[in-house]
Amino acid sequence: MTPRADGRADDELRPIKITRNWLDHPAGSVLIEFGGTRVLCAASASTGVPRWRKGSGLGWVTAEYAMLPASTNTRSDRESVKGRIGGRTHEISRLIGRSLRAVIDYQALGENTIQLDCDVLQADGGTRTAAITGAYIALADACAHLGVSNALTGSVAAVSVGIIDGVPRLDLPYVEDVRAETDMNVVMTGEGAFVEVQGTAEGAPFVRSELDGLLDLAAKGCADLTRMQREALAGA
Amino acid sequence: MTPRADGRADDELRPIKITRNWLDHPAGSVLIEFGGTRVLCAASASTGVPRWRKGSGLGWVTAEYAMLPASTNTRSDRESVKGRIGGRTHEISRLIGRSLRAVIDYQALGENTIQLDCDVLQADGGTRTAAITGAYIALADACAHLGVSNALTGSVAAVSVGIIDGVPRLDLPYVEDVRAETDMNVVMTGEGAFVEVQGTAEGAPFVRSELDGLLDLAAKGCADLTRMQREALAGA
Amino acid sequence: MTPRADGRADDELRPIKITRNWLDHPAGSVLIEFGGTRVLCAASASTGVPRWRKGSGLGWVTAEYAMLPASTNTRSDRESVKGRIGGRTHEISRLIGRSLRAVIDYQALGENTIQLDCDVLQADGGTRTAAITGAYIALADACAHLGVSNALTGSVAAVSVGIIDGVPRLDLPYVEDVRAETDMNVVMTGEGAFVEVQGTAEGAPFVRSELDGLLDLAAKGCADLTRMQREALAGA
Amino acid sequence: MTPRADGRADDELRPIKITRNWLDHPAGSVLIEFGGTRVLCAASASTGVPRWRKGSGLGWVTAEYAMLPASTNTRSDRESVKGRIGGRTHEISRLIGRSLRAVIDYQALGENTIQLDCDVLQADGGTRTAAITGAYIALADACAHLGVSNALTGSVAAVSVGIIDGVPRLDLPYVEDVRAETDMNVVMTGEGAFVEVQGTAEGAPFVRSELDGLLDLAAKGCADLTRMQREALAGA
Amino acid sequence: MTPRADGRADDELRPIKITRNWLDHPAGSVLIEFGGTRVLCAASASTGVPRWRKGSGLGWVTAEYAMLPASTNTRSDRESVKGRIGGRTHEISRLIGRSLRAVIDYQALGENTIQLDCDVLQADGGTRTAAITGAYIALADACAHLGVSNALTGSVAAVSVGIIDGVPRLDLPYVEDVRAETDMNVVMTGEGAFVEVQGTAEGAPFVRSELDGLLDLAAKGCADLTRMQREALAGA
Amino acid sequence: MTPRADGRADDELRPIKITRNWLDHPAGSVLIEFGGTRVLCAASASTGVPRWRKGSGLGWVTAEYAMLPASTNTRSDRESVKGRIGGRTHEISRLIGRSLRAVIDYQALGENTIQLDCDVLQADGGTRTAAITGAYIALADACAHLGVSNALTGSVAAVSVGIIDGVPRLDLPYVEDVRAETDMNVVMTGEGAFVEVQGTAEGAPFVRSELDGLLDLAAKGCADLTRMQREALAGA
């Protein structure tokens, strides 16, 4: 069993850096870094809700995820130029939206909309989990900005786990991600309950005991991230 | 605890009906029914592979999922008319493709492409799991048609599970799906290993013991479906 | 003069099969088969009309036609994936809509919309004429469902005719269609009047006497189809 | 029976004006006017054929039709701005292409492509028939330019006919077109054979005798247009 | 220093031809010719303004520019068929709109919209400057038609200038345009003030004295065009 | 005459901050800040050129500009989601590409492509000029990375100037930009020659003396930026 290229323990997160209020305009914004992965999360608040929700007294939270062309190892084509959003982008945008809505009390939010934008400035694995973890902080700041901090019923954080050479590992960078036999993204609340579990056999199918090991590791990682989120929000 | 509307036991599948060779043209085709859900799965085989794979000696399998406009309770707009594919469609197409590729030996397939089309004729919950379960049979027929049955390294089946009023249930129809607190789709091999696990908290986040219960139920359902797939393929 | 490959007389329809209420959700639905051609026709009724017609007291009927990718001899690309509808699809959708609107009394329909969806599950020539013939039955069921059967001022049926090796023939399957010198689609009312006549010289231009022969043949075919429509609608 | 607003006899064409070589760049070009309808037809010749026809030794002819936004009574939105071509545009482009290909000998054309562009500068009814009639002349000039005049096996012209207040009339301007119970476009060769017949009941369905009357009128109009085409091509 | 291919002096415009009311439907229309460049400019007036301007009491003027496929030396693909508008088209449409809005008093226009359409029928350099110069006349006619001629606060005209072989020249045709080291489009009011100055170094960067020379030349050309616009508008 | 809100002299730039190598993957990258405007410029190098340039021995440089949704005062819709690129984006992308190509020797670059991506992370006026100024540095680093620093024939920098309340001012932030009567963007080489001059009368047309004043101011600003570019490139 070879050690990890960056010297981390198997259950150790990469260095996490959270910079709040990186932008001047949106109600909340965070530049979040999971090692080399850098995601800019913005939460723009606006009065009113989409047409299908008008008059309900309930708010709305939605999310869009995208990668800058030069964020990846080899430049990716710009989706605006291609004129269509790819399946992966669609899928991750939906995942982020669902994850954050899991801790929103629409009634308390009132007829306001919070639009989350998670733009990957640099990608080194785990961009969707960094996005969810950062978006939560931007969302919390936006709720505070709107004076509806009670609209948050809890916190969410997310982390990737995977099996590399038979060993379960936490928070995979790109070099591990491409080699993983199984790849799983887990979104959890600050209380340790599951919001999303998405596991995929990239190589051989995985058995129940492997799945159990990955879930344990994810719970550990999400708990660590939850603590860092609290510290970041406790700052100025 | 109320019984299920259709009188089933909590760990019981809906009536499953598999009609092979429903179409004349493609190499494999199946009309699969999970209760009121009716999905037409076709496997079209063609010589050659996409450009990025040429000369590798390896084959390719890909999938597209779609719903007919009148398949749903209330008519849905046609994606070809809207000029773009929605996020849900993208996501399910990708899931089906990944699931089937998990049991493909590209080397044995040779430089051939099998295109799976899963079109929902009628939707009553569980369309993606019916699609995967049916697509496997169409794929098996297409491999046989190409004379490369050894390109299949196993079988896959999929089922939905969910928690309704605190009770884990197997194979949710639409009326249960909309009420589920947690909704999970599980894809497993015929040997009982996991290919995909996708769980989502629709209402309250779910705890580990609930997750464990759902996984047990899914394993039971996939084993039942695997048996039915074998019987269908053993037919003429 | 060679006989037809399927042994039919030149003025004989293929075996026609009409299955009403093939779907649970829409107000009317029919699976119609003209030999190997299989079209699923659904009529979805909804209250209200498009914006440009609001307040007029008049209803609206519109149609969309599409082919499943695996319905054709060689798989066709999905128009939703291409992001645009092809000219042929557009043309046939418009033809179906015009044909059915020819027997609708908008006043009697009231401010309701009936959306016809004709999806070709399997194509073997004559898909547009099967679609029109089937759509009429779905439309009749939808009008009955809305309690406005008097909105139908008559019935419509359609059939293809063509000249193969100099001989006019009724209801061409694919193998005849590709060889036809002249190809004509005719839509007629149950009373034997014309709603649409579309004739195209595929090979050599055709003279008036040939056109006259084709129109006679079409009138015979439409009369036969009208009778079958009546029988189908007289069933449960 | 009221006379026609412009004083014409029922079987009389509007004033037809044909200006050859209206453009400097394409191999053939014509500004054709049917009364107030003004269509600019260009035939651009290029070496080579589409990919699917390469190496066949056969040429290709294709057509695109469009209307300028300000050509219509009320300004129409630009299809390039809408990002999609409408069904009517698609349908007419296909009709023009088919009609002109009916008189082309692909072998004699050799592996060359002629692209016909028919742009409506001003619309007053009958734009598609003016387009076909003018496109033939541009096509003839383009064939001459390529030195393959023998690629033309005949000529084509087109005219609209319709029934207004029970009376069959030739070459309908907009004011008659909107009032027509039946509307028919007929494309014929210079020898008087049919290339396309497209008749539509706009109001009440039409009977065989009415159809016969319209076809007679169309034959008269196409013969007149054929003579004018010959005269125009006989000019410098 | 070689003379110009068409024998013009360096500060001389090509023959300019302005035909007012070339179209029957729009409130104003002009066919304007700068030598071989031919642009059809239409100004369609309609009551009401875009949503974002409603209730302001202010009018709106907007413009769209496009080229017919056969207008260029080699046929260009149709943007409606490509499904997207190219950058050059976008840029010129915006330039025309801005230029004309510079002489509009929105208050005097009232809540009316004038849509300018500039369609290039034949391109031989300077299409955007011909479009602006012609659009002004169509706009003036449309304002008169609306009875709000006072909404025009002045006139605008535009011309291209460039440096060819070191010599500044006015109103470049295509053969000069492609050889120009520097290319500049200048829009000026009838009073000689600047509305737009757009200069681009196509070859070597240009120095201030060259820029000054080009601006002088443009002022001369715009003054000439202003005079011709006045004459055209003074006609019937 | 009121002083500037941020206390600057009229001919003074905002604080400029240049951070080289902000990204790990592309050959060159710069985060450039003009006051609150923050643009991430990346230069991705790849072997080979677009199809139309193959075999010419010449390289290619192209650029894309975009704004993140939350970069603006009020959130802007994402162009990838809208499915089309707006006119302003198109226009600025083209401007950046032209500006940088003005200092490229394609022969020395060889058959390599450098793709510039300028993504606005935060917008406070002058995003296009910051993009050009930053892109030059990324381009220089990419050329060095490719070992073809001689492909750069000079440097380019860009700045905005405008007339506010009758006073010409350098480098406008958003609050000045919206109030400017005239707005001009000027791109100059390090030697002080012009690459692009784009001036627009936002309010009243401007006279020659005003234009002259703006050009003087722009020359001063570009000279300052050129010095900062040199310093940045002289760093590690």
Image (cartoon, coloured by chain):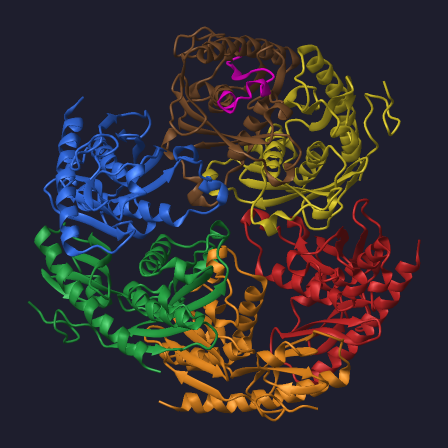
Chain colours: A yellow, B brown, C blue, D green, E orange, F red
Residue D77, quarter of the rendered image: bottom left
Q: Could you tell me how many numbered marks the image carries? A: 0
Q: Is residue F2 left or right of residue D228?
A: right
Residue B145 magenta: yes
Q: Is residue A46 visible?
A: yes
Q: For residue E217, which quarter of the picture?
A: bottom right
Q: Name the residue nearer the viewer: E179 or E118.
A: E179
For residue E220, side relative to residue C162 (left or right): right
Q: Residue furthest front?
A: C1
Q: Looking at the rendering, in which quadrant would you find the C terminus of chain A? A: top right
- On the image, the x and y values in percent for residue A57 come to 50, 36
Q: Nearer the viewer, residue C40 or A134?
A: C40
Counting from the top left corner in percent of width and height, residue A158 is at 70, 28
Residue D71 on image: x %, y %:
36, 69
Span of residues in magenta: B142-167
Residue occupying the far top of the picture: B9
**Quadrant (top left, top right, bottom left, bottom right) of the N terminus of chain A:** top right
| Location of residue B142 with respect to A65 vertically, above or below | above
F109 up-or-down from F40: above or below: below
Instruction: Give the quarter of the image for residue C101.
Output: top left
Q: Residue at x 61, y 60 (%)?
A: F90
Residue F31 picture location, percent across and down: 80, 53
Is residue D72 visible in the rendered image? The answer is no
Q: Is residue E227 within the magenta segment?
A: no
C113 and C159: which is toward the camera: C159
User: Which of the pair C11/A207 is nearer the observer?
Assistant: C11
User: Against C210, is A183 above or below?
Assistant: above
